[in-house]
Amino acid sequence: MPCNCSEFQNITSDLQLLNKSVLDIVTKLDVQTSVLNRAVFKSATHCGCIEIHATKQLFSHNKTLEENQTDVDNHVEGELCPKCKEKIEEEMGELLFYLASMCSALNLDLDEIMSSKLDHLKTLGIYNLL
Ligand SMILES: [Zn+2]
C-alpha cells in the first residue's frame, strides 16, 4: 500500500510524547542514523549476506555524466538476506519517524519537502549530483 507522507507525519506527531522537544528529536535522529548504519555494516560483518568492497571511484573526463554514472559502483556485492533486509527496513522506518517528528516540531510539511525535492531532481536530473 503506498504511503501518504502527510498521514505518516500526522500519526508520528500524535505519538510523540517522551521526545517532543526538538532537542530530543535531533539527538534521536542522529542516534538512529548510527543504528541504521550499524545494521547495514552488520549485514556484511556478522551475517555476511553482503560484502562491501570499496575502491576509488574512477570518473573519466572523456565520458558523459550519464556514461560515468553507469560506470561507478555502489561497492555492495550480494543481496541482503530476509533477516538483514527486515532489520534495515525497520531501522529506516525509525529514521523516518524521527525525520517526520522533526518536521512537525519545526512546523514543516514532509510531503511538501519531498514534492519540492522530487521537482528539483526531475529538473536537474543527473546534474543534481554535481
Ligand atoms: Zn544477512
Image: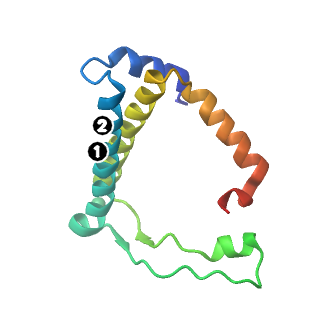
Residue 118 coordinates in the image, percent (x, y): 68, 41
- In this rendered view, identify the residue nearer to me: 108 or 115: 108
Pointer 1 residue: 31
Q: Amino acid at mark 1?
A: Val
The residue positioned 48% from the left and 27% from the top of the image is 103
Residue 2 coordinates in the image, percent (x, y): 55, 30
Q: Label 2's element?
A: helix
| Position of 14 relative to 8 (above/below) | above
| Position of 9 relative to 61 (above/below) | above
Q: Is residue 45 left or right of residue 80?
A: left
Q: Amino acid at mark 2?
A: Lys
Q: Is residue 69 left or right of residue 86?
A: right
State how far apart marks 2 and 1 are (Cα): 5 Å
- Quadrant, the C terminus: bottom right
**Circle 2/circle 1 CB separation < 8 Å:** yes
Q: Is residue 55 left or right of residue 28?
A: right
Residue 78 coordinates in the image, percent (x, y): 40, 70
The residue positioned 73% from the left and 83% from the top of the image is 61
Its colouring scheme is rainbow
Pointer 2 residue: 28
The residue positioned 68% from the left and 36% from the top of the image is 116
> Is residue 78 something that shows in the picture?
yes
Q: Label 1's element?
A: helix
* Quadrant of the rendered image containing residue 109: top right
Farthest-out residue, top: 14
| Position of 68 relative to 90 (above/below) | below
- In this rendered view, identify the residue nearer to me: 73 or 58: 58
Label 2 Cα neighbours within 10 Å, binned few <14 / some 14-19 / many ≥20: some
